Image (cartoon, helix red, strand yellow):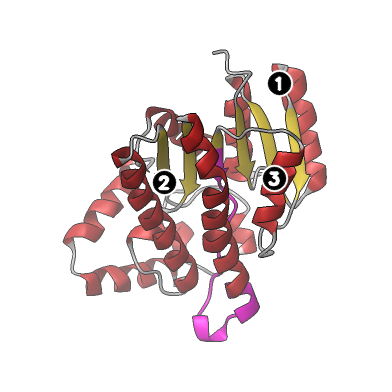
């Protein structure tokens, strides 16, 4: 596939799903803008992808929990003369434990990253896509977006926002014939460093759920994004869990989630 004139921007690109997505885009000839906090990891990935695929990779070390970061990132692409055709809002984190005992600053940073930065980046880059009549946006939500999640209450709520926002935006863009699609990725648990940052070592989640490989989730997300699907829910077990949330009483759902991850 020849797509050397197109550029994909990926946040949270230094590891996990973001890193695997970067490799998929590079394989298909996309130039890349890779954003994460860890500059060393980004530069290693830049070297790998440019050598293997003869593409251009621009990296930016940026902490997107800072309220000013989305605008700074957008301004950076403008100064670099980069036109973003595909935006992947992958950066995010969670926190495990009872809300009343949590660090409120960490909760605020989670909301800023998972919700506010994602929304602002979408708002900044979307008008250019609409003007060009083509573009794609991938927002990483979670199976958590379909249910309330005791002991990870704020994280589950942020992902519910991401899915709802993405679904609504997809309708707006379709009705206005914008040429832009939005896909919300809703995976179950994935084998990434997410769980370490969430400090979820005491959670019983791993004894109840199969953890998917990040490469599998990335491939599924990539395929759905390119097909313009609104929801990407990888794995039969995850789709079954989503189905159950729709037919079971809400009281059952919220208590089942607690039982699974307490």
Q: Which residues are magenta?
A: 87-107
- Residue where numbered disc 3 is placed: 35
208 is higher (above) or lower (below) than 28: below
- Mark 1 neighbour density, 10 Å: few (under 14) some (14–19) many (20 or more): many
User: Camera-side residue: 144 or 124?
Assistant: 124
Residue at 43% of width from left, 45% of height from top? 185
Q: Is residue 46 visible?
A: yes
Q: Quadrant of residue 207?
A: bottom left
* Horizontal relation, residue 29 to residue 162: left or right: right
Instruction: Tell which residue pokes out farthest to the bottom in this image.
Output: 100
Q: Which residue is mark 1?
A: 55
**Which quadrant of the structure image shows residue 257?**
bottom left
Local crowd at mark 3 within 10 Å, few (<14), some, or many (≥20)? many
Query: Image point 59% across, 49% down: which residue?
Result: 192
Q: Is residue 3 above or below residue 247?
A: above
Q: Would you say residue 20 sits in the magenta stretch?
A: no
Q: Mark 2 sits on what residue?
A: 184
Q: Nearer the viewer, residue 141 or 179?
A: 179
The Cα atoms of the two marked residues, 2 and 1, are separated by 27 Å
Q: Position of residue 39 (x, y in %)?
A: 80, 46
């Amino acid at each position: 596939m020849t797509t050397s004139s197109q550029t994909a921007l990926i946040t949270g690109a230094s590891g996990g799903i973001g890193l695997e997505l970067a490799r998929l885009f590079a394989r298909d000839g996309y130039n890349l803008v890779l954003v994460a906090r860890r500059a060393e990891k980004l530069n290693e990935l830049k070297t790998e992808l440019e050598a293997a695929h003869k593409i251009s990779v621009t990296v930016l070390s940026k902490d997107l929990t800072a309220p000013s970061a989305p605008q700074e990132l957008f301004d950076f692409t403008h100064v670099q003369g980069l036109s973003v055709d595909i935006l992947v809002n992958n950066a995010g984190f969670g926190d495990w434990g009872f809300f009343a005992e949590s660090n409120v600053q960490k909760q605020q940073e989670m909301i800023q990253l998972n919700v506010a930065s994602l929304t602002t980046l979408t708002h900044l880059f979307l008008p250019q896509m609409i003007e060009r009549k083509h573009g794609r946006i991938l927002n990483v939500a979670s199976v958590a977006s379909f249910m309330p999640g005791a002991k990870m209450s704020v994280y589950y709520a942020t992902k519910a926002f991401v899915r709802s926002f993405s679904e609504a935006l997809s309708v707006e863009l379709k009705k206005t014939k914008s040429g832009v699609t939005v896909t919300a990725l809703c995976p179950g648990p994935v084998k990434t460093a997410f769980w370490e940052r969430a400090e979820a070592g005491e959670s019983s989640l791993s004894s109840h759920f199969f953890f998917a490989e990040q490469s599998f989730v990335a491939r599924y997300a990539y395929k759905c994004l390119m097909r313009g699907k609104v929801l990407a829910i990888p794995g039969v077990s995850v789709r079954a869990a989503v189905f159950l949330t729709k037919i079971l009483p809400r009281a059952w759902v919220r208590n089942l989630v607690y039982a699974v991850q307490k």
